[in-house]
Image (cartoon, rainbow, N blue to C red):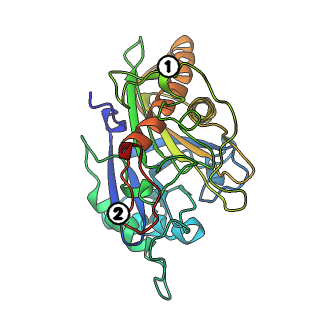
Amino acid sequence: MLNLITDIEGLSVGHATDLTLGSGVTAIIFDQPAIASGTVLGGAPGGRDTALLDPSMTVEKVDAFVLSGGSAFGLDAAGGVQSCLREAGRGFAVGDVRVPIVPQAILFDLLNGGDKDWGLHAPYRDMGYAACADASTGRFELGTVGAGTGATTATFKGGLGSASTVGSGGHRIGAIVAVNALGSATIGAGRHFWAAPFEQDSEFGGLGMPATIDHRMRLKGMSAPATTIGAVVTDAILTKAQAHRLSIAAHDGLARALLPAHLPLDGDTVLSAATGAKPIEAPGFMELCHLAGIVMARAIARGVYEASALPHEGAQRAWRDG
């Protein structure tokens, strides 16, 4: 176990990172089409092909998920991932044509000091292709990388985080998240994480909780949108409706790790998928929902903990800068 979403067999993760741009793309590629759903609880979301994730919609399985910076410009990234998968012969079969199914969520990172003067066409389609081509199993980078490259929060630099765990029945569940919150992952003006009660093996510093708790709202702005976007994946056999419920439960992790979360200018989105390797009974599924919130909370704290500041004048300081 690497404490990463790639601890779930049957998927790989790849990044495309541009520090000068101050943005990036992360692709989660499934070896085989996976049952998938998702939930949007933020008031200012951006996504592509997210409507098909509703349990009432016909297509049940996806080939990949994409997390991207770039706000609405970043929605081109899914097209790049589709091109990569089409080359590999992947996709939903319609007659003799295959259409890769690639839902995507985006975050707003256009005001972080990076060079966004990209000319006529935004670079995200090419970055999506590169992230897909980079995808591999096993260990991958966290922090200021991929979709977390340009992420920020109210107090410290945001980033790309991941975590995993194993349920009592042996089912694995993992989370991956780009932390770009309007609120804060840390308590008050200090460095303690709201997710501290769920930390394992000092994975984000081992500071625990402070002696006193400052609940006052801290926001990185009152007019620009933000968004924390992520995904949870399990190796259990789930229906699409169960995958939808899993995504709702994972949003509890946002509420545990960010204060506040799900604001009118957040676009908080959690995608969910099941690779279908192991059957599960009802009590085991309830435990998976419980664990979904915990691994998401841990992943959020890790994303901030692992981040480094962008190489731009006036860039937001990272947690590791002290």
**Label 1 SS:** helix
Amino acid type of the residue tagged 1 in the rendering:
Pro
Would residue 274 be visible to someone looking at this image? no
Q: Residue at x 56, y 23 (%)?
A: 289
Relative to 189, residue 143 above or below? below
- Name the residue beneath numbered marker 2: 17
**Label 2 SS:** strand
Quarter of the image with the N terminus is top left
Amino acid type of the residue tagged 2 in the rendering:
Thr
Residue 11 is tagged as: none
| Distance Cα–Cα, label 1 vs label 2 | 32 Å
Quarter of the image with the C terminus is top left
Name the spot of residue 149 as percent of width and height, x first.
41, 58
Within-10-Å neighbours for mark 1: few <14, some 14–19, many 20+: some
Name the spot of residue 72 as percent of width and height, x first.
60, 68
Name the spot of residue 215 as percent of width and height, x first.
67, 30
Name the spot of residue 167 as percent of width and height, x first.
42, 16
Along the viewing direction, whichever of 145 and 184 lies nearer the viewer: 184
- Which mark sits nearer the N-terminus, 1 or 2? 2
- In this rendering, the count of numbered labels is 2
Circle 1 or circle 2, nearest the eye: 1
Q: Is residue 74 left or right of residue 87?
A: right
Q: Is residue 311 left or right of residue 211?
A: left
Asked whether the residues under the numbered discs 1 and 2 touch, taking CB atoms below 8 Å apart as contact, a structural biologist would say: no
Q: Residue at x 41, y 43 (%)?
A: 319
- Name the residue beneath numbered marker 1: 197
